[in-house]
Image: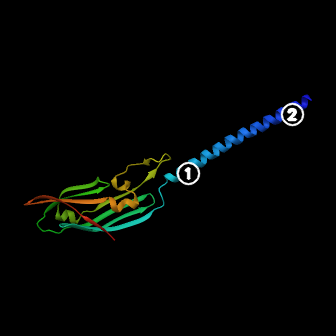
């Protein structure tokens, strides 16, 4: 009878240990699944977008603009600026994304403007907590699908009548 009681105690202990181990195993498995889901949510989505565009206002234009988004890589290039009014000799240019100043060049001549190339390249990385890693600027922070709505180019110039600011109308192809 004593052997039977010890056998039952050992059996119950083994079953309890098995149940406890199963509970901890399930909790650990669920924790890992949740962690992997969070990592997947934080990854940069699979993106392959290319925007080509031009810009024009009453007195200024540019002929070539391209923004490329390939997964975490981003690039921007804007070239072939023109002053359309021969009376404007000097101007300033500002480029904004999300209303944040990205690029500024003041007091440039017509020749300097025509040779101007605005360029940016970079990558976006996200850590396990969803925080961006590395140095980011206004362009890199623009989400690919929001690019069209968040770019603004502002030109400033002065003539005998005073100083003026024009926004270029961005035309996407």
The residue positioned 45% from the left and 52% from the top of the image is 125
Residue 121 placement (x, y as % from top left): 37, 58
List the single residue furthest toward the top.
2
Front residue of this view, candidates 107 and 84? 84
List the single residue furthest toward the left.
160
List the single residue furthest toward the right.
1
Residue 95 placement (x, y as % from top left): 27, 57
Front residue of this view, candidates 126 and 111? 126
Q: Residues within 10 Å of mark 2 (few under 14, many from 20)?
A: few
Q: Specify the quadrant that holds the C terminus.
A: bottom left
Q: To which residue does mark 2 refer? A: 7
List the single residue furthest toward the bottom.
173
In the image, which disc is placed on residue 37? Answer: 1
Q: Is residue 61 left or right of residue 48?
A: left
Residue 163 placement (x, y as % from top left): 12, 57
The residue positioned 45% from the left and 62% from the top of the image is 47
């Amino acid at each position: 009878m004593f052997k039977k009681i010890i056998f039952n105690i050992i059996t119950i202990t083994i079953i309890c240990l098995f149940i406890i181990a199963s509970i901890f195993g399930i909790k650990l498995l669920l924790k890992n699944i949740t962690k992997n889901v969070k990592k997947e949510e934080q990854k940069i989505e699979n993106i392959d977008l290319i925007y080509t565009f031009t810009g024009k206002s009453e007195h200024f234009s540019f002929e070539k603009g391209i923004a490329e988004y390939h997964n975490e890589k981003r690039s921007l290039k804007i070239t072939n600026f023109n002053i359309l009014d021969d009376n404007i000799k000097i101007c300033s240019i500002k480029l904004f994304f999300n209303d944040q100043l990205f690029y500024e060049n003041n007091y440039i001549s017509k020749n300097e403007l025509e040779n101007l190339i605005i360029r940016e390249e970079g990558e976006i990385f996200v850590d396990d907590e969803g925080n961006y890693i590395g140095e980011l600027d206004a362009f890199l922070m623009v989400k690919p699908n929001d690019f069209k709505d968040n770019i603004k180019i502002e030109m400033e110039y002065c003539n005998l009548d005073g100083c003026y600011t024009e926004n270029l109308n961005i035309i996407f192809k």
